[in-house]
């Protein structure tokens, strides 16, 4: 699915607001702790897609995230759209 459709799917599912001031740093912490889980691997794919500008997301991944991680993913998408982080930060790990 393209980035616009992914964003719409996220907005439909997100029920929480992301509590983190720095969502990308929190995503890296999450991956350090849970990177081998299905949710961690899905988060890694989202970050890789955001970093590459590929703009193609798997629709099924929206359903892999917990409510808290889903809010984090939505914040990451918004941060990328807003240009909040330089490209190098998206490829940090």
Image (cartoon, rainbow, N blue to C red):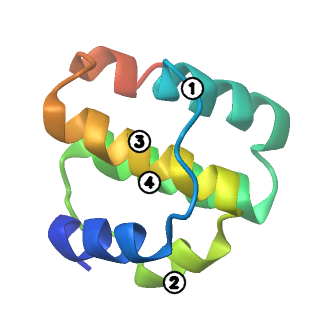
The label nearer to you, 4 versus 1, is 1
Whether residue 73 sits left or right of residue 16 in the image: it is left
- What is the number of the mark on residue 71? none
- What is the number of the mark on residue 20? 1
The label nearer to you, 2 versus 3, is 3
Whether residue 81 sits left or right of residue 1 in the image: it is left
Considering only order in the chain, which callout, 3 or 2, is on the residue closer to the N terminus? 2
- What is the number of the mark on residue 75? 3
In the rendered image of this protein, does residue 38 appear above or below residue 32? below
User: What percent of the width, then of the height, locates residue 51?
Assistant: 30, 38
Q: Which residue does the image show at 24% across and 36% down from the upper left?
A: 80
**What residue does disc 2 label?**
60
Is disc 1 placed on a helix, strand or loop?
Answer: loop
User: What percent of the width, then of the height, locates residue 8?
Assistant: 27, 73
**What residue does disc 4 label?**
46
Q: Residues within 10 Å of mark 4 (few under 14, many from 20)?
A: many
- Quarter the C terminus occupies: top right
């Amino acid at each position: 699915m393209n980035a616009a459709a992914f964003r719409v799917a996220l907005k439909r599912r997100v029920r929480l607001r992301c509590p983190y001031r720095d969502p990308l740093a929190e995503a890296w912490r999450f991956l350090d702790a849970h990177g081998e889980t299905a949710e961690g691997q899905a988060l890694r794919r989202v970050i890789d897609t955001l970093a590459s500008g590929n703009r193609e997301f798997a629709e099924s991944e929206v359903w892999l995230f917990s409510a808290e991680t889903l809010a984090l993913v939505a914040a990451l998408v918004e941060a990328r759209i807003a240009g909040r982080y330089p490209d190098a930060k998206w490829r940090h790990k």
